[in-house]
Amino acid sequence: MMKHTFLVEIGTEELPSKDLRALGEAFSAHIASELDIAKIHHGEIKWFATPLRLAVKITSLSNTQSCYNIEKRGPAISKSFDSYGRPTKEAESWARSCGITLNQATRRMIGKKEWLVYCSKIKGEKVKNLLCNIIIRAIEKLPITKMMQWNNCEVQFIRPVHSIAMLLDNDVVVGNILGIKTDRVIYGHRFMGKRKIILNHANEYPKILLDHGRVMADYLKRKEIIRKSVETVAKQLGGIVNLNENLLEEVTSLVEWPVVLSARFEEKFLSVPIDVLIYTMQNSQKYFPVYDSSKGSLLPYFIFVANIESKKPKKIIAGNEKVIRSRLADAKFFFTTDRKKKLQDYLPRLNTIVFQNQLGSLRDKSKRIETLAAWIADKIGANISQASRAGLLSKCDLVTNMVSEFSEMQGIIGMHYARYDGESEEVALAQKEQYQPQFFGDLLPTTLVSCSVSIADKMDTLVGIFGTGYSPKGDKDPFALRRAALGVLRIIIEKKLFLDLEILTKQAVQLFGKKLAHTTFLIKKIIDFILSRFFFWYQEKGYNVDVIQAVLSCHSTVPTDLDARIRAINSFCMLKEAKSLVLVNKRISKILIKSSNLISNKNINFSLFKKPEEIKLAICFIRLQKTLKPLLESGRYQDALKELLSIDKPVNFFFERITIMSDDFEIRTNRIFLLKKLQELILKIADISFLQI
């Protein structure tokens, strides 16, 4: 069978840099998937991506599809022919849909019935005839959230498309994709090399683009060239770079021919907090800051990546120095202006910023955070006065000039200003760490004071927004309540803080005073929402749904306790003996359901137990009550579950040799009540009836 090389390149206008790699990888993955579905054998699939193109090259592509069999079952024979052997309308309709006559159908026994079956071997088509539709389907599956239209046509794509090159070896695969006829033309760099390039063979890609078009189409190679060049230039400047992977990816997505250059800025700007300088260079200008290799401090240099090889690089360097000088001058001005006041002096201005129409201003919110953070600090052993102070100042930097200009500096600049004001380090650090974690997998606050403020801030938002009658629906969550709930859970569980969500929520609700109705329903709604995030979080961590459900059914509202129970149940499920306890529990449950009318709240009457099997079970119950109590109180659920395994034999002997439904009413109800009390011991850990072992 002949093997071919296939190439497709979509030439576009500037693609979004933050999505470029994902688009390139997805294009390749979807083409591979479509080839597999079409039963087309192929070799290596390689993707390429630059700001102006997406491409995929496939080697060792088969000439034709693999042959395949199809099988289509029709109606049962009993429904295909009447009592005289004449075909029914149902059978004839099925045969027509298959393009055959009933005489051409096969009869086959499937189960206990005989059925009509259509079997056929389909000969594979030529791959060249299938490629256009495969590419169209792959494009349709690309992860594009916002589409664009151009030239008054109905075609949509992430950016306007100018060319589609599609070759199978040296032949153009004829078709129309995204409103453009396929061709063998690709385009080089806009300002260097050959602009229009004719591809004679798919194998020429991407080398011809590199040699004649001055375009490095290979994304990963381009990224590595930039990485190594930036590190080399930093070393030449007597420093190092802490390469931010996100920035490196974005810069790679912005250039087709990377040229790494360095420039400098005036040392006077080093008086501005380092975070502001780094933010300005990285986020605003896509520059790489340079650090002193020994001290770790910032040097007055930066490295940038140009998209052109200029004969006068000094002009490019001077232009970038002019831009950064202007940006840093603004930052220095804002910083100097802000520093004329202390952080606490900005408190009155918070009255002018509305947090939410029904919930008051940011000043109101900061008062609530101040009080709640102090309450939390008391519960978790943090410094109460520092937590209170940090909560009071927590929103002050939002009305500074620096945050007004650089919004992503909120919290960070508050930390620096607090330090300049002489606040304690824990109070200053809490200004920054109150927002952590900001996303799944983000760092947590490092101190207990920071934890107190962060939890207080998130709980205030959760309670306040839920109290106004709003809750997230579908993918709409403008107040980021899901993120806030997960943040609260992560801090409590990963920092091993003993906080009860029910008590915490009640405390947060009370601080809103008359702004919220202090209803039991509101508190329950908030707790249920937080625990729903717990459910999804532990699913993400790899725990089985039945394990999580078994634990949540015990209605604990202490996150660290829930975590301990889940770990215990998960380990318990791996024990060989676990299944027997689950079966015992299910058997007890069935008896209790059938005898629900006989269950009362009276105590067990041990004097009514006469037979050895019920006496042994009663003794086992008494022993377990004493043994389990300290284990449950200390959260040693794994040890408690191992102790519960001891009821297996006594319960089974009890079931085998004791007639539970005795004619004597007192004996009958006493035996049932013993089983109820045994089940209650199990339920103190989790409802193991959920477990699928």
Image (cartoon, rainbow, N blue to C red):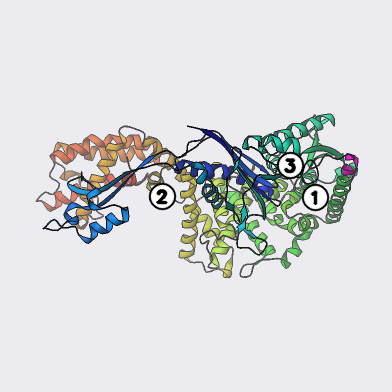
Query: What's the magenta region?
Result: 307-318
Q: Earlier in the sequence, mark 1 or mark 2?
A: 1
Position of residue 145 measured from the top left corner of the image (x, y, whole percent): 59, 56
Position of residue 58 measured from the top left corner of the image (x, y, whole percent): 57, 37
> What residue type is disc 3 on?
Glu
Q: Quadrant of the C terminus?
A: top left
In this orientation, which residue lies closer to the viewer: 233 or 474?
233
The residue tagged 1 is: 421
In this orientation, which residue lies closer to the viewer: 539 or 349?
539
Res 552 label: 2
The residue tagged 3 is: 256
In this rendering, position of residue 259 left or right of residue 460: right
In this rendering, position of residue 279 left or right of residue 7: right
Q: Secondary structure at mark 2?
A: helix
Position of residue 644 measured from the top left corner of the image (x, y, whole percent): 31, 37
Residue 471: in magenta span: no
Marks 3 and 1, Cα distance to the nearest angstrom?
Answer: 47 Å
Marks 2 and 3, Cα distance to the nearest angstrom?
Answer: 53 Å
Q: Where 640 falls versus 360 (above or below)?
A: above
In this rendering, position of residue 68 left or right of residue 539: left
Position of residue 438 measured from the top left corner of the image (x, y, whole percent): 62, 49
> What residue type is disc 1 on?
Asp
Image depth: mark 1 or mark 2 in front: 2
